[in-house]
Image (cartoon, helix red, strand yellow):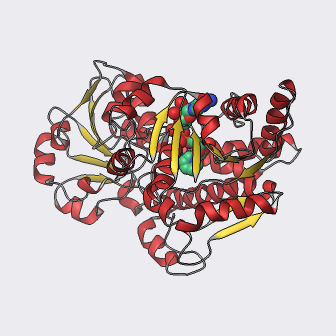
């Protein structure tokens, strides 16, 4: 089938490549000339495990191409996916300008039936807006060409995106026309062989489903963070509590890891956007507001702890940071806790030595070269001349380091573990002062 994907970011590139992988002819279009040039030169602008090889294969076999030419893009696909960004507006609601721009582009060019698919995470009612925009653009051309608008939210996780797309838990299709459900069923059939994962519903429910999923996951994490803060004050170890509750199948082990706050391109903005949607219809979503507030506070805990440890005087200190991306296996730093920590340290006059397996280029892009930031080529390089260590992302490579070298290099052997990767007892035996998240009395100075 012929497929066009607007937006060649994390979602657009992965979706387009996976759809090509199963035999479709896919054109990915983006307004960012630089991104498209990179892709046409065999480079992949984002880090996602396995994506580079899959892109290379599908380009070579002629099923996948990249362009900034909207005329070609609209002409190509029966399916026109919208996978552009929906960042937060100034007031926290989802900024739909990019979605609207794509809808307009399609309406200004389409001359035969098209299925327009919202894959971006968009507030309830967006499909209606897309439909209005396309209808208006067609009207201005004196056309009444048929089209359908579908909500097909994406649930992939960065770091596991290809697997998530190839073997989805569910494929949510929101439509008001059974014809489009069948067209999408055919498009998604290769991902649906094991058992039927397609959940068909009305458009508004599909739009809300994506926000419900992300808000619930953010709530689970936040609940555990709140409990971790309590455990710390009560002399309990949250890691024991986690094991104690996770074994209950009604609770489960997923998304109950305490830590220094969630970040990324989805949870923070989606919780905020849903809260804003609620406000717009006169509903005070107290739980969502609390999740957002608790998470924002959680992201400041590491800095508060480090500052307290050095008696509020961080001027001239150097903190060694492991992990900059918001989670492992991605280079994405949107809303990452590392940004809150680094910016607070800099504001307090401290320096940062940092290492991340994939996110250092992105760090450089965001902050540029600065005297108080040294990005180190090797993980162990961060410790020379540093006063303390902070771990912010649980990359596998950080799990079992050479602690003696770390201890010998730090001026004070102290570890602030924002992800509870290390064992407090072992750390004390090795001669470190260890501060985890919610790990009993040892965390309180
Ligand atoms: N990143 C994730 O893990 C994830 C998961 C599920 C859903 N989502 C949702 O998917 C959407 C896209 O997210 P992302 O992380 O891929 O964003 P992204 O910022 O990585 O990519 C968006 C791309 O859209 C391009 N773009 C903007 N306007 C355009 C236009 N008019 N025509 C063509 N391209 C245009 C941008 O240049 C950019 O390359 C968001 O709504 C997001 O919430 C993201």
Displayed-image quarter of ligand 1: top right
Residue 174 versus residue 138: which sits nearer the camera? 138
The percent position of residue 414, horizontal first and vertical second, equals 25, 46
The percent position of residue 123, horizontal first and vertical second, equals 75, 45
The percent position of residue 378, horizontal first and vertical second, equals 17, 40
- Which residue is rendered at x = 36% and y = 51% of the image? 54
- Locate residue 357 relative to residue 168 in the image: left or right: left
- Locate residue 353 relative to residue 181 in the image: left or right: left
- Which residue is rendered at x = 41% and y = 26% of the image? 366
Identity of the residue furthest to the bottom in this view: 248
| Quadrant assignment, res 310 | top left
Q: Is any atom of residue 443 visible in this view?
A: yes
Q: Quadrant of the N terminus?
A: bottom right
- Locate residue 140 relative to residue 326 in the image: left or right: right
The percent position of residue 158, horizontal first and vertical second, equals 46, 51
- Which residue is rendered at x = 28% and y = 57% of the image? 396
Residue 361 versus residue 118: which sits nearer the camera? 118
| Quadrant assignment, res 219 | bottom right
- Which residue is rendered at x = 62% and y = 44% of the image? 77
- Locate residue 401 relative to residue 65 in the image: left or right: left
Q: Is any atom of residue 268 visible in this view?
A: no
Decide: is 364 above or below 271. above
Decide: is 18 above or below 13. below
Residue 201 versus residue 393: which sits nearer the camera? 201
Counting every numbered tag in the picture gives: 0
């Amino acid at each position: 089938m012929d497929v066009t994907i607007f937006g060649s970011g994390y979602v657009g590139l992965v979706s387009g490549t996976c759809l090509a992988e199963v035999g479709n002819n896919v054109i990915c279009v983006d307004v960012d000339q630089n991104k498209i040039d990179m892709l046409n030169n065999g480079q992949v602008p984002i880090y996602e495990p396995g994506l580079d090889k899959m892109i290379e294969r599908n380009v070579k076999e002629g099923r996948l191409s990249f362009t900034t030419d909207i005329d070609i893009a609209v002409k190509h696909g029966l399916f026109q996916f919208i996978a552009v960004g929906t960042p937060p507006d100034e007031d926290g609601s989802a900024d739909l300008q990019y979605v609207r721009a794509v809808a307009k582009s399609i309406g200004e060019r389409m001359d035969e039936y098209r299925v327009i698919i919202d894959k971006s995470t968009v507030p309830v009612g967006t499909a209606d807006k897309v439909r209005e925009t396309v209808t208006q653009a067609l009207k201005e051309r004196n056309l009444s060409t048929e089209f359908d608008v579908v909500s097909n939210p994406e649930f992939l996780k960065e770091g596991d995106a290809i697997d998530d797309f190839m073997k989805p838990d569910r494929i949510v299709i929101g439509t008001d026309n059974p014809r489009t459900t069948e067209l999408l069923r055919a498009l998604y059939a290769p991902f649906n062989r094991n058992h039927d994962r397609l959940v068909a519903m009305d458009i508004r429910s599909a739009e809300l489903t994506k926000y419900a999923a992300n808000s619930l996951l953010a709530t689970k994490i936040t609940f555990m963070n709140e409990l971790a803060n309590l455990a710390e004050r009560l002399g309990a170890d949250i890691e024991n509590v986690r094991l104690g509750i996770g074994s209950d199948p009604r609770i489960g082990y997923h998304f109950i890891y305490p830590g220094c706050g969630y970040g990324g391109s989805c949870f923070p903005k989606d919780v905020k956007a849903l809260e804003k949607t609620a406000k717009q219809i006169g509903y005070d979503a107290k739980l969502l507001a609390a999740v957002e507030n608790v998470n924002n506070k959680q992201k400041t805990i590491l800095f508060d702890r480090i500052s307290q440890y050095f008696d509020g005087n961080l001027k001239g200190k150097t903190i060694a940071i492991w992990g900059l991306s918001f989670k492992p296996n991605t280079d994405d730093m949107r809303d990452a806790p590392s940004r809150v920590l680094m910016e607070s340290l800099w504001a307090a006059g401290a320096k940062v030595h940092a290492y991340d397996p994939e996110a250092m280029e992105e760090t450089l892009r965001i902050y540029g070269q600065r005297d108080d930031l040294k990005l180190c080529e090797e993980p162990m390089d961060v410790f020379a001349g540093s006063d303390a260590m902070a771990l912010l992302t649980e990359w596998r490579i950080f799990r079992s380091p050479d602690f003696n070298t770390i201890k010998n290099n730090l001026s004070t052997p102290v570890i602030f573990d924002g992800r509870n990767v290390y064992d407090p007892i072992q750390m004390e035996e090795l001669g470190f002062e260890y501060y985890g998240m919610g790990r009993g009395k040892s965390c309180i100075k």
